[in-house]
Image (spheres, coloured by chain):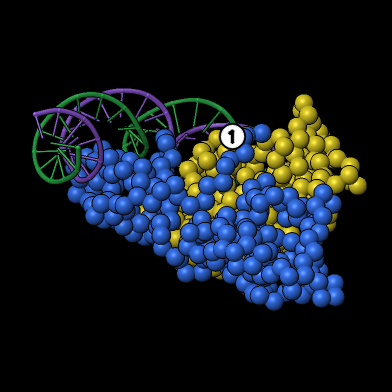
Chain colours: A yellow, B blue, C purple, D green
Amino acid sequence: MPPRRPFRLAPPEPVALTARQRQILDWIRAYAASAGMPPTRAEIARGLGFSTPSSAEDHLRSLARKGAIEIRPGTSRGLRLLEAPGVPVQGTLPLVGRVAAGSPILATGHIEGRWRVDPALFSPAADYLLRVRGDSMVDAGIRDGDLLAVHATTEARSGQIVVARVGGAGGDEVTVKRLKRRGRAVLLVAENPAYAPIEIDPATRPLAIEGVGVGVIRTGL
Amino acid sequence: MPPRRPFRLAPPEPVALTARQRQILDWIRAYAASAGMPPTRAEIARGLGFSTPSSAEDHLRSLARKGAIEIRPGTSRGLRLLEAPGVPVQGTLPLVGRVAAGSPILATGHIEGRWRVDPALFSPAADYLLRVRGDSMVDAGIRDGDLLAVHATTEARSGQIVVARVGGAGGDEVTVKRLKRRGRAVLLVAENPAYAPIEIDPATRPLAIEGVGVGVIRTGL
DNA sequence: CCGGGTACCGAACGTCCATACGGTACTGCG
DNA sequence: CGCAGTACCGTATGGACGTTCGGTACCCGG
């Protein structure tokens, strides 16, 4: 065991994050922006599906070691997000366009731009905007090209409009549908009679909820 | 499904803070900006010279009661700094609610609040947001309660969605309809078969165009 | 003079939270 | 093959933190 270090120092050179670490960092960023404070270990675990806070602690240590965040020992919510290459301007929402298979929705490659829109316009607060493709939700007043304001969360109640990824980590593009729970199965229902509901048994086909829709912005009439 | 919240945009009532309370709010603001997270009661006490956290608690309760902050019960550092009331923040759009007869649409009495929304999201740029009442434009994807982004202008082309005041200066409330020109007459067409078009001969009945719709914001789903 | 609001103090309680320890499984590397 | 790193799990502990209760003192309008 090396001698005990008095402080947890960021390494001199930035170290590349893994995909998972980037994903977790993005989640923390979204949480901090929406909640106005950094998350606790337990909240990270809950938000990302861990069953114990220590998994969150592990990731935080990795992120701190790689210089992505700072940890203030002994302090509740004692996280500080350090400067990232894509400077997230205060009070702006990232606009997410097409999302490639298997990559986190808030990866910098998907961010088409940023718009100055108050996240608190919506409730719960919006974490990002997602450009909606297709007309599968027209009857819910969501049209092709609309921007869906999304609150990043992995939990959704039946009846909510969700941003979901079907097929798991290696899945296809994300989809916007209304979530319905039927027993232990899950239905993704389009708000357009031309589209049939998608039924999913979580035991056989993974379903990842990326967030819930909290509003719509249409930038042209 | 949770009950649909009533619209609540502006803080209920701007209550004046005492000098001491403003001082403490400023301190909290400075702390949050510098630390990246809101302070604890103990930190507030330490920073302001109190000898006990309960003094900080007292002040937080007062600030919350007056609408300056929000407190999340049981949550460490669970403070949220709310918008300073009455301050026309740069880069915000005024939200216009009900418009009384005969008064200008942007009169302060009609402004329910201001939202930080980039006017350049829309083109031409939005000048204000108008709360839409009724379902006369549902087929255009504009629903009851939506915020219509409006570009203030008195000129509109046929086919555009306009904010119009019928009956002239002393007219009734403003209305949102699609404008159609037919010869020298003007039609205001609802996008809902349940509503008949309104035909107006400008020679006999005055028609004032207040602006054209350039976008929609729906703050709840 | 009494009630209510402001501005503090001090003690105490319970739970939220950071953190340590130890374990499993998988991957890539030399 | 062993070794290191990643990505999780479960349990446990002590201190950090929110919150309550009760008290003192001052000011103000009725």
The chain that hosts pointer 1 is A
On the image, numbered disc 1 is attached to which residue? A51
> Which three-letter amino acid code belongs to the residue tagged 1?
Ser
Quick check: A184 left or right of B1?
right
Residue shown at 65% from the left, 55% from the top: B132
Q: Residue at x 77, y 75 (%)?
A: B157
Location of residue A149 (image quadrant): bottom right
Image point (54%, 64%), residue name: B103
Q: Secondary structure at mark 1?
A: loop
Residue placed farthest to the right in the image?
Answer: A194
**Residue A169 in picture, x, y percent from top left:** 74, 48
> Which residue appears farthest toward the front when viewing the image?
B204
- Say if residue A51 shows up in the picture: yes
The foreground one among B105 and A132 is B105
In percent of the image, x 47 and y 43: which residue is there?
A: A40
- Which quadrant of the figure has residue B93? bottom right
Percent across and percent down for residue B164 are 68, 65
Vertical position of residue B47 compared to residue C21: above or below: below
Q: Nearer the viewer, residue B20 or B136?
A: B136
Could you tell me if residue B163 is visible in this image?
A: no
Q: How far across and how far down the image is residue A130, in percent?
A: 70, 57
In the rendered structure, the answer to whether residue A171 lies left or right of residue B211 reads right
Identify the image quadrant of the C terminus of chain A. Answer: bottom right
**Percent position of residue B67, x then y:** 39, 47
Tell me the crowding category of disc 1: few under 14, some 14 to 19, or many 20 or more residues within 10 angstroms, Cα based: few
